[in-house]
Image (cartoon, grey):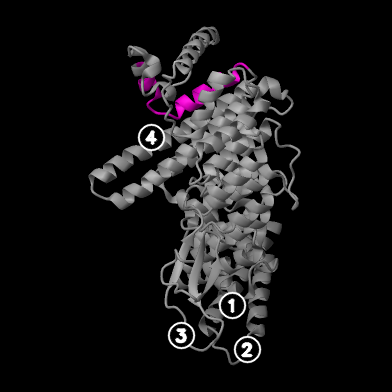
Amino acid sequence: MQNIPAIRHGKHMGFAWGPEDILVYETQFKASGPGGSFIHKVRKDEDIHSPILRKLFNESHHIFVGLQTIKEDVPSKSKKPQFVSISRNYRSVIRACMEELQQVAVFIFLDHHPNHCFAVLSQVSILLAIELIWNLCEVLFIDAAPAGSLLLHLLDWVRLHNADADEKAKDVLQSDSPAEHHHYWDVPGGTQTLTEFDVKWRNWHEEVDRYLKDNSFSNAAHTTWYHFLITRLLYCHPTVKPIELHYYAQSCLTMFLDSRSVQEPLDSILLAAFEFDIYLVIKDCSIVLNNWWFVAHLTDLLDHCKLLHSHNLNFGSNMREFLLIEYASGLFTHHSLWQCAVDYFDHCPELGRACLELQIERVPLDTERKALKVLRICEDRQMSEQVRSICKIMAMRALRNNRLGSALSWSIRAKDAAFATLISERFLQDYCTKGTFSDLDLIDNLGPAMLLSDRLTFLGKYREFHKLYGEKRFKEAAKLLLSLMTAKIAPRSFWMTLLTDALPLLEQKEVIFSADQTYELMYCLEELTSSLDTEQDVEQTKVELLRLSLARNLAMAIVKEGTVDT
């Protein structure tokens, strides 16, 4: 609590959990007296918001997806080269980010921002430790080098994590007396083959023995206990077996640390690796590191190597799935990395889908483009409930902005009949007000979607009537107009509009409506006027005009049909 500003000593702290952050504030148990006036936002995964580390997350996502495609039915031993290659790919991504952060730190330092520079260098040191641990796990667990070649792998591990080892080795070898060079013990091993190593080791061992007997042996100045470990193994036990490593590791750590030294978390993790305690490595890394990236990807790789398959947790998930879900949940809080997180959930067979359904609902639908991305993810996974929810949200937003076409499109996609009816009503109201339809392309291409609701069907058919009329296909238009009323598709409130639309057809020189059709129109008009309240202001002029036109058309139709019959 002392790291949170404005939380005074002796005061209580209140908090509220969120999907991304925790809100922290000063509070009291008693209601009397004022509380704190500040609310602080504490982020759980700060690294996710680092532009450079974002590259780490994106690149490792591709490696992760590729790892999942390796066939399960192939024996693990035959897949070992693939797993080692994948492990090295992960490490290369870590190292690339580390180098980029180092360059950034230099530029920041030159710009005289020491505080910011310190923060970047702190990230570099974390990545350096991560790569150190991963590389050791690769040697011991994934590559699983046997006795004999094991020490060569460990020499490469030490040399790789000593940036100037090659330069030191060159200086040592070129000196007049290599064994007395002050960097002699910092560069054990080298890049020679196993045969060369054996010959040189014997010569070197004899030389060291001679110096010991002469009391001219120079004290080794090692920077870390694990450098000391590899040097000791090189001298004493170059064919060390994997099972014996923990004994030498513990001994070197004890010898290296004096009474004033405190064992660092990194020491504990490396020691656990030398003891071949995979679960302790993962546990300690989960506690120490500031995000889930490392433990999630390493555990996944070890699980594919069939090293973790028997370790299940008490709440229905195995360790791999738990860590992947925790990592993916953190990614979902980022505005762009959430798309990577989907693949992690997809490859968690037990709880992945349930977690994805919960997380996908929290993605802010800032734009229509983003909403379509989320929708596509849900549709590809048959997440029908989430599809409906997204479409309803977008439809309501479009309706509030008076974008009727977009609102109708989203409601159709959601298969929401009630909302489609509401928007269709708005379209019809706009038509009554303006005399024209908006979003004609959408209405003209409704197709089978118009069957979602009666009102939407009417909207589509009414627009079709206008198209037939515009194309001067009067008889087809008249038949469709009449069917909208007789089949009760059109709402009663819209009948007067439809009857008014029939007037131009009734006034045509050619008889469009047959006698039977005219009778049906007259019946609809009378039914409409009889159901209206007598006190209601009915457009009497329009009604009288309709009656006159219908009577005239009926007479013409009877005459025409009688003439045809005779």
The residue positioned 27% from the left and 42% from the top of the image is 107
C-alpha span from label 1 to label 2: 19 Å
The residue positioned 56% from the left and 24% from the top of the image is 85
Query: N-terminal of the two: label 1 or label 4?
Result: 4
C-alpha span from label 1 to label 4: 88 Å
- Name the residue carrying label 3: 34
C-alpha span from label 1 to label 3: 78 Å
Query: N-terminal of the two: label 2 or label 4?
Result: 4
Q: Which residues are magenta?
A: 148-170
Q: Is residue 14 magenta?
A: no
C-alpha span from label 2 to label 4: 83 Å
Residue extending farthest left: 111
- Name the residue carrying label 4: 99
Look at the numbered discs 1 and 4 and tell me whether their residues touch, using CB distance below 8 Å. Answer: no
Residue 124's place in the image compared with 30, above or below, is above
- Name the residue carrying label 1: 547
The amino acid pointed to by label 3 is Pro
Q: Element type at marker 2?
A: loop
